[in-house]
Image: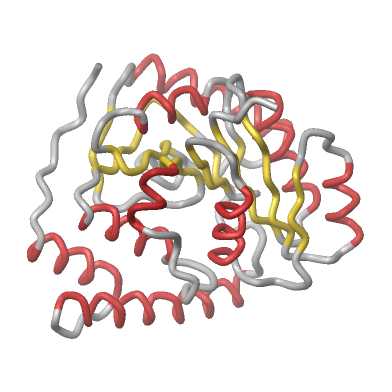
């Protein structure tokens, strides 16, 4: 069997309708040779039934919820592709999404690339309605951004990990995700690690991916886990920077002051 160009890693909990919509969008809109790997953190019969409906799918079944970051690392371990894309189950991708991600991460010195969403880089009200309606609106938004921002990139310090692509060679050089982060801030942490290793991170301003945002975790639990992760993030980078930091903005500012990162403005090809 030919080696896939891209391994798409999707950690999931017990969100069958959301997961089905996500996987259907991937299988319908991905036009390069790929493999789809789902790390299932739930033993619920509903989500397992959902996953059984997809033929070209590899499922790694966990005995319980091991957390997002450990699941992502499991995906790396099972992946065969030259590039790895980490995708949340509450994301909907448009046609041609992988091709545009690949176009950027294949450039020399690029460590990761990600799209715009209604919560990242482009302010737009949360897309409502059923999943079919959200998918249709995602396609319209994506077509609009391709007309508005053809070929436009923005170098960033932090990429949000709901949908991002990283070359395998970069993951092997920099290391995998820090499993101390059970839920949240693993993407902030890895973004800074990529930067300190000399890699550039790009936001693709002509690609829109819908992100429902934290659709798999109840609000109170999500907030508690996020607070814990932010404290861990600040403590870790306080040791690296050499002074006490509070909250993620202070971490990013301290890193950029100590290790200046040359930014480039948004540009076209």
At a point 58% along the width and 21% down the height, the residue shown is: 32
Residue 2 point in image, percent of width and height: 64, 25
Q: Is 45 situated above or below 28?
A: below
Q: Is residue 108 left or right of residue 67?
A: left
Tell me the colour scheme of the image.
secondary structure
Depth check: give the residue in front, 143 or 181: 181
> In the displayed image of the protein, which residue is found farthest to the front?
1
Q: Is residue 116 left or right of residue 258?
A: right
Q: Is 140 situated above or below 58?
A: above
Name the quadrant containing residue 21. top right
**Quarter of the image containing the N terminus?**
top right
Depth check: give the residue in front, 20 or 117: 20
At a point 20% along the width and 30% down the height, the residue shown is: 266
Name the quadrant containing residue 196. bottom left
At a point 57% along the width and 46% down the height, the residue shown is: 87
**Res. 140 visible in picture:** yes
Q: Is 149 situated above or below 234?
A: above
Depth check: give the residue in front, 98 or 74: 74
**Res. 129 visible in picture:** no
Q: Is residue 199 left or right of residue 89?
A: left
Residue 255 point in image, percent of width and height: 16, 65
Residue 98 point in image, percent of width and height: 51, 28
Total marks shown come to 0
**Quarter of the image containing the C terminus?**
top left
At a point 30% along the width and 82% down the height, the residue shown is: 235
């Amino acid at each position: 069997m030919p080696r896939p160009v891209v391994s798409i890693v999707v950690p999931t909990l017990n969100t069958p309708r959301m997961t089905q919509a996500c996987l259907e969008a991937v299988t319908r809109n991905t036009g390069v040779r790929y493999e789809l790997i789902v790390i299932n953190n739930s033993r619920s019969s509903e989500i397992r039934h959902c996953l059984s409906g997809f033929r070209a799918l590899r499922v790694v079944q966990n005995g319980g919820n091991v957390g997002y970051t450990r699941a992502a690392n499991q995906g790396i371990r099972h992946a065969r592709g030259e590039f790895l894309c980490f995708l949340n189950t509450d994301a909907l991708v448009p046609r041609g999404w992988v091709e545009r991600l690949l176009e950027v991460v294949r450039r020399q010195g690029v460590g990761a690339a990600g799209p715009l969403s209604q919560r990242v880089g482009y302010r737009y009200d949360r897309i409502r309605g059923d999943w079919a309606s959200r998918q249709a609106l995602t396609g319209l938004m994506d077509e609009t951004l391709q007309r508005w921002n053809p070929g436009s990139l923005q170098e960033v310090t932090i990429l949000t990990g709901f949908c991002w692509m990283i070359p395998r060679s970069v993951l092997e050089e920099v290391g995998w995700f820090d499993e101390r982060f059970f839920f949240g801030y693993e993407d902030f942490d890895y973004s800074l690690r990529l930067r300190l290793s000399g890699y550039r991170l790009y936001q693709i301003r002509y690609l829109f991916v819908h992100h429902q945002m934290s659709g798999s975790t109840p609000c109170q639990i999500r907030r508690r886990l996020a607070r814990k992760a932010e404290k861990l993030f600040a403590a870790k980078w306080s040791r690296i920077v050499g002074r006490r930091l509070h909250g993620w903005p202070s971490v990013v500012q301290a890193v950029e002051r100590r290790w200046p990162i040359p930014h480039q403005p948004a540009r076209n090809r």
